[in-house]
Amino acid sequence: MLKKFDREMNEIIKLALKEDIGPGDITTDVLIPQSAETKAVFVAKDHGIICGLPVAKRVFQVLDKNIKVTYKKKDGTWVKPGEILATVKGRARALLSGERLALNIMQRLSGIATYTNKYVEIAKPYGVKILDTRKTTPLMRLLEKYAVKTGGGVNHRMGLYDAVLIKNNHLKQIDIEKAYVDMRRWIPKDMKVEVEVETIEMLEKVIKLQPDIIMLDNMNVEMLHRAIPMVRKSGIPSKIEVSGGINMSNIRDVVKTRPDFVSIGSITHSPPSMDISLRMIS
């Protein structure tokens, strides 16, 4: 996934380095000789799934193309405190100036991967897939969705351009039957159309349209036990997504209703970060 978006990843890193370093790392530039070289190791301080090693490597190599990074673990690997994740060798200035950004990204992405995986493992016995949302950090969506995939989740649409999602705020402005027909005329034939539904009454209308995906939004478990059988018994091929207010306290009850997907905003907007350090060893 990262290779596919190589240019975008470089742009993200350059913007982040500009934010942090600005016109120069004044402390490092004054104290550290330009020719000084060093070695450092990334070390896990938490249990979790590591994610973001290739991005951290790119951070250092944007600063100095001669930096050498050797992976000791691969993205997607479960690690425990004290395990070495990678070694970094090269100019000390590049390591010191890039340290914070590399760690920020790895800690954030590893946190997302680990948190996503907790939901994935709960949903797996029921054949339910965990989806992410657009609730991502501005300019970090590409990387955060990569972390979701690393944790075993599935990416929903990347943005407003690659799939249609007719939400309740749209439906307050339009007639759903007419809007759906118009939409199908305008979009590519292979583009998926999803419709968000909050009530049983609206669900009855949407079932007749047979969209690719029906999103049951903000329905409690009791309503899901009514809504999901309605869709299944109708015989339409639409997939069912459940969304809204899903957390660790209710995920088990939700997946037991056996939708196809459960989308969870918190896996990208508020996961706990994983603690990782970069230790200079010479």
Image (cartoon, helix red, strand yellow):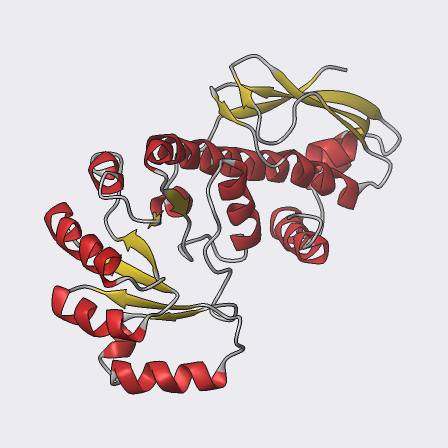
73 shown above or below 178: above
Q: Quadrant of residue 5?
A: bottom right
Q: Is residue 187 left or right of residue 248?
A: right
The answer to whether any part of residue 27 appears in the image is no
For the point 31% across and 64% down, which residue is it?
A: 236
Residue 202 is situated, as x and y percent measured from the top left of the image, at 17, 71
The correct choice, above or below, for 60 with respect to 233 in the image is above
Pinpoint residue 102: horizontal percent, then vertical percent: 63, 37
Measuring from the top left, give residue 2's x and y in whole percent: 66, 48
Viewed as shown, does residue 207 lie left or right of 139? left
Q: Is residue 109 above or below residue 207?
A: above
Nearer-the-camera pick, 278 or 258 = 258
How many marks the image carries: the answer is: 0
Give whichever of 257, 169 is nearer the camera: 257
Point 32% across, 36% down: residue: 126
Q: Position of residue 233 (x, y in %)?
A: 22, 58
Instruction: Inspect this view and state whether residue 132 appears.
Output: yes
Nearer to us in this view, 185 or 165? 185
For the point 59% across and 33% down, the residue is 103
Quadrant where the C terminus sits is top right
Q: Residue furthest top?
A: 82
Task: Single out the residue that lies furthest toward the left.
Answer: 222
At a point 37% along the width and 39% down the height, the residue shown is 127
Quadrant in the picture for residue 119: top left
Relative to 17, say whether 90 is above or below: above
